[in-house]
Amino acid sequence: MKFGIDSGHNSPPDTGARGIKIEDNLTLDVGNRVITKLRALGNEVVVCKPSSASTVRESLSKRCTTANASKVDIFVSIHFNAFNRQANGTEIFATSESGRKIAKPVLDEIVKLGFFNRGVKSGSHLFVLRNTDMPAILVECCFIDSAKDMNLFEPEAMANAIVKGLTGKVSSVPVNPVSDEEDNVDTTILRLQKALNRLKITDKNGKALVEDGFTGANTKSAAEKFQTIVGIQPTGIANAATWNAINLILAKRIIRPNHAGGTVVAYLQYRVGVENDGVYGPQTEVAIKKFQQQNGLDADGIVGPASWQKLIG
Ligand SMILES: [Zn+2]
């Protein structure tokens, strides 16, 4: 069997979410183990993650091109979820019936490790599933911002579950781990200023921040404003909770009406000028649709890649 294994992100500017852990590190770690194990079991594996990319779009399309050109039998993209620190568990996206058949045993094996079963879901909105020619799945192993999941998560066990689900077999071949040593909380002021500007959070004078890397009253006021919007104690100091919220928004997850809210919805509500209670209800839907209309987008109320592009670039 010929597998295309896509370790998610890891191609700046295509970087993953950040929570308690860093998605890039985990997808690489699990991906490397899956690749090595599949090969040890006698399968051919094509590594689909590009070595570099200039845009997220390019990063994604290179993965598909590699899989398609290599004519792999099955494409597997490995990711980790992040949402609101409460959500947890495993879900696998597939588009075709054949994809769903591949997803089910993988999901079952991961769930055996103790993760909540969120099911096999339709992945027709996902670029790498839409643009690969063969049966393809995208595994959201678990949530990097969930304490429950991160306590349970163990890269070797996760990789074994994926390989067992794909092949029915396990391999205990040793694999070099990817260290998770990068500091998860980047407190540098320059990064904060850049992030707040990207999120269009202005200072107390309604102005964008000067990106000078120095703490001052303006940067502090913008940080306070952001913290208030997303419901964190407004200290003006970028702590772990603040970075977690920033990274959740920058992850640009698709947001649909009538779904659980939280940080990202509260931020969207701020941007479209409705009461920011963090719940995507009817009022928010009207405002989002209006925003989409004003920006020449499909006014469907679903905040997908095009809407995110208009919101935060
Ligand atoms: Zn991801």
Image (cartoon, grey):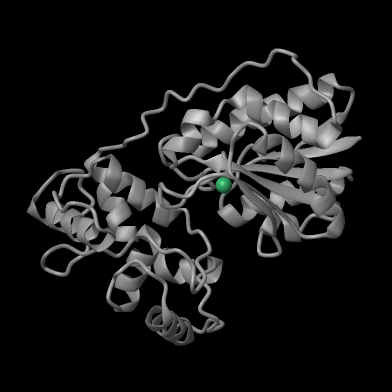
Residue 191 visible within the image:
no
Residue 234 visible within the image:
yes
Q: Look at 69% across and 48% down and name the residue there.
A: 138
The one of 60 and 236 positioned closer to us in this rendering: 236
Task: Relative to 94, say whether 282 is above or below.
Answer: below
Q: Look at 21% across and 43% down and name the residue there.
A: 213
Q: Can you give x and y, in whole percent of width and height, for residue 103 in the image?
A: 77, 47
Q: Is residue 153 left or right of residue 110?
A: left
- State which quarter of the image contains the N terminus: top right
Q: Quadrant of residue 305?
A: bottom right
Q: Look at 13% across and 52% down and name the residue there.
A: 220
Query: Going by the picture, which residue comes out furthest to the left?
Result: 217
- State which quarter of the image contains the C terminus: bottom left
Q: Is residue 299 left or right of residue 249?
A: right
Q: Is residue 235 left or right of residue 62?
A: left
Q: Look at 33% across and 65% down and name the residue there.
A: 266
Q: Quadrant of residue 279?
A: bottom left
Q: Can you give x and y, in whole percent of width and height, for residue 240 in the image?
A: 29, 40
